[in-house]
Amino acid sequence: MHACGHDPHTAALLGVAKVLSEVKDKIAGNIVFIHQFAEEKLPGGAKPMIEDGCLKGVDVIYGAHVFSNSPIGTISLNDGGLLAAADSFEIQIQGKGGHGASPHMTIDLVVVGCQLVMNLQQIVSRKVDPLSLAVVTVGTINTGQNFNVISDIARITGTVRTLDEEVRSLIENEIDKIVSSTCAGAGATAKLTYTRGYPDLTNDKKEATRITSLSENILGEDMVFQVKPIMGGEDFAYYLKEVPGAFFFVGAGNEQINATYPHHHPKFDADERSMINTGKVFIAAIQDYLNTESEVSGQEKVEILR
């Protein structure tokens, strides 16, 4: 069970397509509908979509994601970095196994692994500018199977989240140095596999301002929030590296129907009225963009929302 909200995303987009198809004769130009797929698994769906030409002739792009942490009727975004680059790493360590009663005759990878995890935590606190956002998280440590046996192999995995390419490269280099020095100091050997995932998602200022203004008109100024960056990752970032646009969160939380669980939780649910709000903002953005362009070209304005 994926439990993230891609079903209401698809339904909302189909709704927008249905509404626009009824006024397609009034629309100058083409509107491309992109259904997201494979977003949670590298390399993601956006990259191959771009390679297959889905952005050919596209001038601007908008994306939305339901958010159970925000109440129904709200929109959240900012006009800059909204989501982080999401990288992963895997460390394979080789030591020397033996009996737990004779640790002096082994290279104990439980100790080495714990030292390595603690050393990695010093990267953000001591190597990254305090004004730059970054996360280094170790998600798994696997070694040994018996209480009295020291294993000779260990595996550590984790993730790195950054909003700046220089910080991203710095952390990758620091992880490599720490893995090498920590393991060498204990007499162990290690292999680091660092995988760069999705890039940071940065909204275009002009298009984010457009979405903000339109959302305030539709839902009310008190229902639209400018938020700080979130360190989650999203492959929509690839689209925004190619064309200007904006990505925003649509509130889908509702305590009355128990739709408050976080994304990926087994009980995750979304207030389905969020699909209507997603559709309204998408249609308003399309209408506003087309009418802004029509002022330049002298074409007749289109009215989709009343």
Image: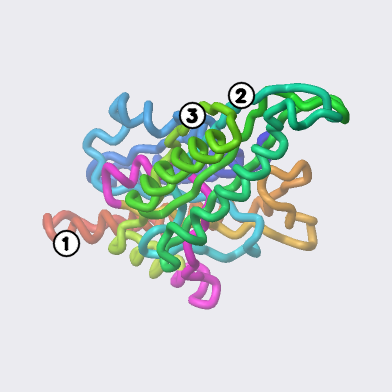
Q: Give the vertical position of 240 relative to 144 (above or below).
A: below
Single out the residue that lies furthest toward the front: 104
Element under disc 2: strand
* Coordinates of residue 231 in the picture (x, y in percent): 52, 54
Residue 168 included in the magenta stretch of the image? no
Mark 2 or mark 1, which has the lower sequence index?
2
Looking at the rendered structure, the kind of residue marked 3 is: Thr
Q: Which residue is mark 1?
A: 295
**How busy is the neighbourhood of tag 3: few (under 14 within 10 Å), some, or many (20 plus)?**
few
Residue 306 visible in the shown view:
no
Residue drawn at (61%, 39%), measured in percent from left and top?
A: 7
Question: Within the image, what quadrant is residue 146 found in?
Answer: top right
Q: Tell me the amino acid under the disc marked 1.
A: Glu
SS class of the residue under badge 3? strand
Segment tinted magenta in the rendering: 216-244
Q: Where is residue 81? Give x, y as percent.
A: 39, 58
Residue 20 occupies which quadrant of the picture?
top left
